[in-house]
Amino acid sequence: MVVIALVGMLALIVLAALSSAKGRGDDAGIQSTMKNLQTQSGLYYSQNGNVGVTSGDCVTAGSMFADATTYGLSKLLTGLRAKTTVACFSTAAPSNIWIISAQLKSDPTKYWCIDHGGISRQRTQPATSTLTMCDAY
């Protein structure tokens, strides 16, 4: 019985370690996709000279987030949204600013944030508008 109890405790320790590693791996995938989104958003702006229409979500038609043509922004966002909670906001010309945040898996109280200014960092709350850029909250 002692052996069975020890094996059970070891199994719990291994499972906890694997769960933690999986969460960190998921976070790395989220951060990688967010970096790709940041790059593709810059290309979209360079080509179009704007961010499209003002958007309060990741699917507004006419916004850069819904672009399914050259830059693949909608495809990247669709894949990301299948894995975690994502918030997208943009303000059309003349401001042409945008922000995207995604909830991290290893700690659901943390979010990865990217914005039009090139900021990419961890935050403690999701983006709620273009007034809350990654370095301002």
Image: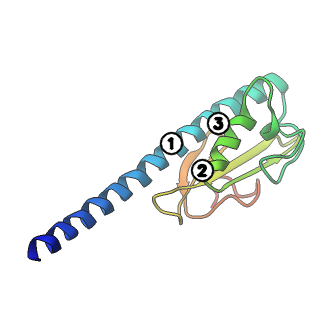
Coloration of the structure image:
rainbow
Pointer 2 residue:
83
Are circles 2 and 3 on residues that touch, CB within 8 Å? Answer: no
* Residue 31 x %, y %: 53, 43
Residue 17 falls left or right of residue 56: left
Are circles 2 and 1 on residues that touch, CB within 8 Å? Answer: yes
Residue extending farthest to the front is 1
Q: Nearer the viewer, residue 41 or 3?
A: 3
* Residue 134 x %, y %: 63, 52
* Residue 128 x %, y %: 73, 61
Residue 121, labelled with which disc? Answer: none
The three-letter code of the residue at mark 1 reads: Gly
Residue 59 falls left or right of residue 16: right
Residue depicted at x 88% and y 47% = 54
Sequence-first disc among 2 and 1: 1
The mark closer to the camera, 2 or 1, is 2
Q: Secondary structure at mark 2?
A: helix
The mark closer to the camera, 3 or 1, is 1
Q: Tag 1: Cα neighbours inside 10 Å, few (<14), some, or many (≥20)?
A: some
Q: Which quarter of the image is occupied by the N terminus? A: bottom left
* Residue 23 x %, y %: 44, 54
Residue depicted at x 58% and y 39% = 33
Are circles 3 and 1 on residues that touch, CB within 8 Å? Answer: no
Pointer 3 residue:
38
Residue depicted at x 78% and y 30% = 45
Residue extending farthest to the bottom is 1
Sequence-first disc among 3 and 1: 1
The three-letter code of the residue at mark 2 reads: Lys
The three-letter code of the residue at mark 3 reads: Gln
3D distance between C-alphas at marks 3 and 1 = 14 Å
Pointer 1 residue:
29
Q: Secondary structure at mark 1?
A: helix
